[in-house]
Amino acid sequence: MCGIVGYIGKRDAYPIILNGLKRLEYRGYDSAGIALYDGSEIQLCKTKGKVADLEAKVSKEMPTKGNLGIGHTRWATHGIPNDVNSHPHFSNSGNLVIIHNGIIENYTSIKKELINRGYIFYSDTDTEVLVNLIEDVKKNENVKLGKAVQIALNQVVGAYAIAVYDKNKPDEIVVAKLGSPLAIGIGDDEFFIASDASPFIEFTNNAIYLEDEEMAIIRLGREINIRKIKDDSLVAPYIQELQLNLEQIEKGGYDHFMLKEIYEQPSVIQDTFRGRLLADKGIIRLGGLEDYIEKFVNADRIIIVACGTSWHAGLVAEYIFEDWARIPVEVEYASEFRYRNPVITEKDVVIAISQSGETADTLAAVKLAKEKGAFVYGICNVVGSTISRATHSGTYTHAGPEIGVASTKAFTTQITVLTMIALKLAKVKGTISQSDYMLHLRELDLIPSKVSTALDKNDSIIEIAKIFKDATNFLYLGRGYNFPVALEGALKLKEISYIHAEGYPAAEMKHGPIALIDEQMPIVVIAVNSNHYDKVVSNIQEIKSRKGKIIAVVTEGDTIVRELADYIMEVPYTPETLSPLVTTIPLQLLSYHIALMLKRNVDQPRNLAKAVTVE
Ligand code: G6P
């Protein structure tokens, strides 16, 4: 993971890099560092901890003059988070300095070789090995920095987005990418480098996203020189206009990004519909799908690959696709799928779901599925992300930047897209009646206002959070469409509050988790109107007779579960097929409030990162 930022131009580099690191902190936040060129020397400051700790350290220890610099916020892979392992890293001569997001897998053998040649290593990182390898190549082959980077990268195995400069050539930064994202912002004789465009959005709307196996020599007063790392061939720069704006990446009056993103759901679900769902006319139009509809209609099966919350959205899709479109669906953890030698044929459609569009395992699963001849469709949030470009076609969720590490609006917008796809396929295949189709289109159109109503119950959820904030274990139960919601509810709680929580299909409770139930144990049961309502009521009875504490998500007006449960969280009525879009809301709020009461870092929970670009 990790976030990287760089600047070269006329402005003071320090504030740009520092603010950029703050915006990229979602990518990793166990240590941070910065290396500025002050006109004659490289000033370097780095520390274990967050970007705010770096800022404090810089204010005491480092002059901040200079128009060229690089910065890094880290999620440790090699070497524990401490000051020494933090980036940037110097080469032995002190001339080169580097930042790196990714992993150099063969760093041990390269390190041994470099040690034999007299190099000394101060950190445990693979990155320090890379910068010394570049230095070694530069010296031995007597080449310029760009060439040395290229030769060195052809010797490494792994993933990287790097930025490196030489204090003896302070008008140039060399960057390269394989597997980890790297954007270059193009200003007026100034350049910005970052893991995504957020660090430079107020300075320029023009950016180049490097492709895998590309490097760029960024030099003041020159055109950017982009080359293929493997064969040195020139690549014409493709400058994209960014759609991001500053407001989208700020908290907008909320205490946390997560809360802002929870409350954005009515509007972003609407954005996901925009121009695609014409409920009154009975039309669903998804640009990426129209040309490939036959692939889906004729598919033997749909395989969904994803990780984390996106995998949960995939599980919801399994129910919807099979129910409406009558296409068999398998939902796979991308990390298992890619290493399992799966049976895939040209008659399979693979859907990759990823908020960031950068998750390493999901990307590898996409590549594998393509190699095996499947048609691969992407559902991503980040426009222009690696997975969105690696797939044959796809649909963006349009949720806007999701910065809180715990995913919220990405989940509901993914389900929105998947629901539209399933309805469209069902309509084309004729597996849904016209009346059912029209009913669901209209109901889908009403979801934003129902999500708003669910959010209005926030105060009552705060009261429940107060009661259960000190519990050490939670169980989340749901059936059918709401089984994945139970998994997602449990994941949200453990991610940000560090309370152990497990999600289970309600009926499976009897095969194990029931042994955990005692008077202390809170059990969140999703018990909204559904085909399984009576069965869920029976499950609640079973919990009650073992004295567990029941917190039930119920449909407004419910009387039966209200009687049985200790606490209820109400959501508006919606057909069962669409219910995950509303039942997930109180679970997000419950996790948020419990984490807040426990004084956790809600937006940046320990050990986690937003975009997992390592496997
Ligand atoms: C990380 C994030 C999760 C996310 C998962 C998959 O674990 O913390 O919130 O669900 O990655 O990410 P993706 O970007 O592929 O949806």
Image (cartoon, rainbow, N blue to C red):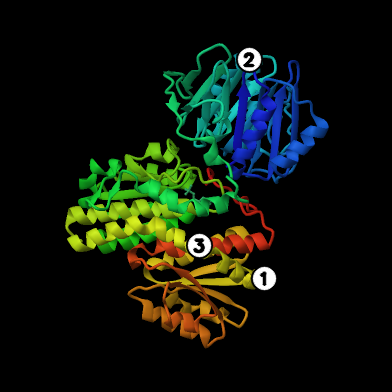
- Which residue is the site of mark 2? 171
- Which residue is the site of mark 3? 456
Asked if marks 3 and 1 touch (Cβ < 8 Å), the reply is no
Gap in angstroms between the C-alphas marked 3 and 1: 25 Å
Q: Position of residue 157 (x, y in %)?
A: 53, 35
Single out the mark in the foreground, 3 or 1: 3
As shown in the figure, which amino acid type bears the numbered disc 3? Asp
Q: Earlier in the sequence, mark 3 or mark 2?
A: 2
Q: Residues within 10 Å of mark 1 (few under 14, many from 20)?
A: few
As shown in the figure, which amino acid type bears the numbered disc 1? Asp
Side (left or right) of 45 relative to 567: right
As shown in the figure, which amino acid type bears the numbered disc 2? Asp
Foreground of the two, 364 or 609:
609
In the depicted structure, whether residue 488 falls above or below residue 346? below
Q: Position of residue 109 (x, y in %)?
A: 62, 35
Gap in angstroms between the C-alphas marked 3 and 2: 54 Å
Q: In the current view of this chain or complex, which residue is farthest to the right?
A: 60
Regarding mark 2 in the picture, which secondary structure is present there? loop
- Which residue is the site of mark 1? 470
> Which mark, by number, is residue 74?
none
In the depicted structure, whether residue 410 falls above or below residue 51? below
- Picture quadrant where residue 367 is located: top left
Q: Earlier in the sequence, mark 2 or mark 1?
A: 2
- Picture quadrant where residue 219 is located: top right
